[in-house]
Image (cartoon, helix red, strand yellow):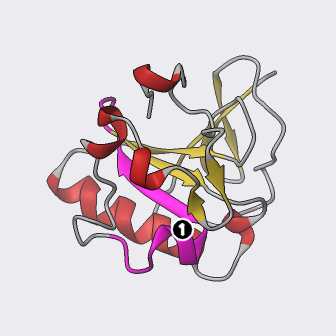
């Protein structure tokens, strides 16, 4: 999410984020106070500070999955939780894909899990320069090629 008061663009890790959460939580700006992730709405099982991923629905009918610490996407259960939440929201909110924002990356990895979703290692912390659709292992992803 973008935070105007902090000059933080959308899909970039906030400079105030640490591995234990927001370092300025009690003094956070209104843009942060007004925002609610899916954990606060009851859709994400584990707290983002515990799982290392924060899940939200963005305005483009995509599920945004923010990695809040390095390597959290690969931790046990996180990919499965993102796909579970995607499937739940795809039925009621017309969600069409997932944005994965790796910790510290300035790029967005986009993919659309299907019923046979399987991570085939196509995700990396390397920022994506251009957004072009391609299919990798049966999963639609954007690549910088």
Which quadrant would the C terminus be assigned to in this image?
Answer: top right
- The residue drawn where x is 36% and y is 71% is 44
- Examine the image and state in which quarter residue 117 appears: bottom right
Q: Identify whether 43 is placed above or below 113.
A: below
Residue corresponding to mark 1: 116
Q: Position of residue 82 (x, y in %)?
A: 48, 65
Asked whether 50 falls inside the magenta stretch, the response is: yes
Nearer to us in this view, 52 or 57: 52
**Residue sitting at x 41%, y 54%:** 26
| Residue 137 locus on image (x, y percent) | 71, 53
Residues in magenta? 44-61
What kind of element bears circle 1? loop
Q: Is residue 91 left or right of residue 1?
A: left
- Can you say whether 58 is above or below 55 in the image? above
Q: Does residue 130 lie above or below 111 as drawn? A: above
Q: Is residue 26 left or right of residue 118?
A: left
Residue extending farthest to the front is 27
Q: Residues within 10 Å of mark 1 (few under 14, many from 20)?
A: few
Residue plotted at (71% across, 29% down): 106
């Amino acid at each position: 999410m973008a935070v105007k008061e902090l000059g933080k663009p959308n899909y970039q890790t906030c400079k105030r984020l640490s591995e234990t959460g927001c370092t300025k939580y009690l003094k956070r700006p209104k843009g942060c106070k007004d925002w609610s992730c899916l954990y606060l709405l009851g859709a994400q099982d584990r707290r983002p500070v515990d799982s290392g991923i924060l899940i939200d629905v963005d305005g483009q009918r995509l599920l945004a999955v923010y990695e809040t610490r390095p390597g959290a996407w690969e931790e046990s259960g996180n990919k499965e939780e993102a796909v579970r939440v995607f499937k739940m929201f795809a039925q009621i909110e017309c969600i069409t894909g997932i944005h994965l924002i790796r910790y510290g990356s300035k790029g967005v990895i986009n993919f659309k899990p299907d019923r046979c979703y399987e991570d085939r290692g196509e995700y990396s912390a390397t920022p994506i320069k251009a957004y072009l659709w391609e299919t990798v292992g049966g999963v639609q992803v954007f690549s910088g090629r």
